[in-house]
Image (cartoon, rainbow, N blue to C red):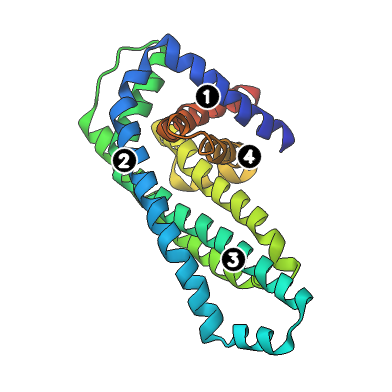
Amino acid sequence: MLKELILSIRAYYMAHQFILQNKLWKWMIIPGIIYTCLFIVGMDYFGQTSSFFIEWIILKTGLKTFVDSLNSDWLGFFITMGSFWLWFTLLLFYFAIFKFIFLVLFSPFFTYLHLRVAAIQQGKEFILNVSTYRRLVIRAIQLSLTNLLWQTVYLIPIVLVCTLPLIGWFTPIFTILMEAYFFGYAMIDYGLATEKQSRIASASYVSEHKGLPIGNGIVFYILHLIPIIGWMTAPFYALIAAHINTQEVKEID
């Protein structure tokens, strides 16, 4: 798994080289701007609503009154830390929803871009087959919705656990790894679908190579720490890096 994580990280550098060599950056400008605008608006909305939501929970459960009555600095510290980790976990949960909505809306573009990348890598002339293209888009949408459902199911108990002292402070780590896995899975499936692998075969492949989707998703998240440029390029670099990964692992296997 460690080897696959390293391959995933290296694949982003190779994707950068591939994009420059084949002048694919021009395909990312307008979608990248749209993604960046949606990301800024979405995060601003989360920032305005999340704090009110946490405060509402504390007040409704009577936790604030209970803590004030005990007048304990240590208990207040644990409550403050728990609130922070709850806020951070909710941020990841919100971003997960935003991410999958974006994947659904942009699945036609991602499919088209991936088909171009595959044609370039194979040295073939790019010819768009409408029926194949339509099938791949529908599959990408179905997978994104399925992954969103499963990720939500897994996140609900995580959100509950993150309110517990000490134990809950580690839940964001598991949340990030899980979100990275599901996002990387969606990116890798574009390549497997193009190679006419069934969804069951794709799920089996990703399960056997967990380091690939996790590594792909982690770098995707890290790129969001770079304002504007990182936001504009993150999803598209992730797509091309995932394609490069699947080709590398297939050759090794």
Side of 158 relative to 40 (left or right): right
> Residue 244: which numbered mark, if any?
1
For the image shown, how many numbered marks are present on the structure? 4
The tag on residue 165 is: none
Q: CA distance from mark 2 to mark 1?
A: 20 Å
Quadrant where the image shows the N terminus: top right
Q: Residue at x 50, y 38 (%)?
A: 224
Label 3 neighbourhood size at 10 Å, few (<14), some (14-19), many (20+)? many
Whichever of callouts 2 and 1 sits on the residue coming sooner in the sequence is 2
Q: Position of residue 146 (x, y in %)?
A: 42, 56
Q: Is residue 195 visible?
A: no
First in sequence: mark 2 vs mark 3: 3
Whole-Å distance between the Cαs marked 3 and 4?
31 Å
Amino acid at dot 1: Ile
Q: What kind of residue is marked 4?
A: His
Considering the image in quadrants, where does the C terminus appear? top right
Which is more toward the observer, 242 or 246? Answer: 242
Distance between the alpha carbons at the discs numbered 3 and 1: 36 Å
